[in-house]
Amino acid sequence: MTKIEQHIIDQVRERRKKLGLSQIELSQRLGMSDSFVSHVETPNRRAKYNVNHLNALAKVFKCSPRDFWPEKPL
């Protein structure tokens, strides 16, 4: 897992928790398998968010896809 990937996962997790969504609920809102978000958030898993996921996540969280990225390179 790279630093940038971990940063994005952390940003999504934080927003998910603020909205009170479970991993399963978020997976379902994304139209993915119930375990998708769990696989992304679990260390040492190979699942990752791609740009299409970030766009869909931004729709769920009503934000910009840019909000998941750091302000400066990591």
Image (cartoon, helix red, strand yellow):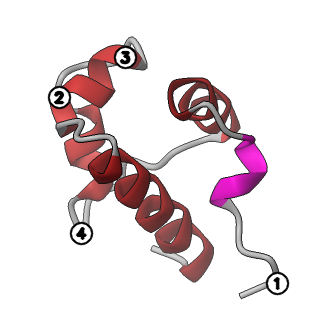
- According to the picture, the residue beneath numbered tag 4 turns out to be 43
Pointer 4: residues within 10 angstroms few (<14), some, or many (20+)? few
- According to the picture, the residue beneath numbered tag 1 turns out to be 72
For badge 4, the amino acid type reads Pro
- Earlier along the polypeptide chain: callout 3 or callout 1? 3
Kindly check if marks 4 and 2 are in contact, taking CB atoms under 8 A apart as contact: no
Q: Residue at x 62, y 73 (%)?
A: 4
Describe residue 23's horizontal placement relative to residue 61 as left or right. left
The residue furthest right is 72
State the image coordinates of residue 21 (x, y, percent, origin top left).
24, 36
Residue 29's disc is 3
- Earlier along the polypeptide chain: callout 1 or callout 4? 4
- Earlier along the polypeptide chain: callout 4 or callout 2? 2
For badge 2, the amino acid type reads Ile
Q: CA distance from mark 3 to mark 1?
A: 30 Å
- According to the picture, the residue beneath numbered tag 2 turns out to be 24
State the image coordinates of residue 61 (x, y, percent, origin top left).
53, 34
Q: CA distance from mark 2 to mark 1?
A: 31 Å
The residue furthest top is 31
* SS assignment at label 2: helix
* SS assignment at label 3: helix
In which quadrant of the rendered image does the N terminus lie? Answer: bottom left
Image vertical order of residue 17 relative to residue 54, above or below: below
Q: Residue at x 25, y 19 (%)?
A: 33
In which quadrant of the rendered image does the C terminus lie? Answer: bottom right
For badge 3, the amino acid type reads Arg
Magenta span covers which residues? 64-68
Q: Main secondary structure of the magenta part?
A: helix
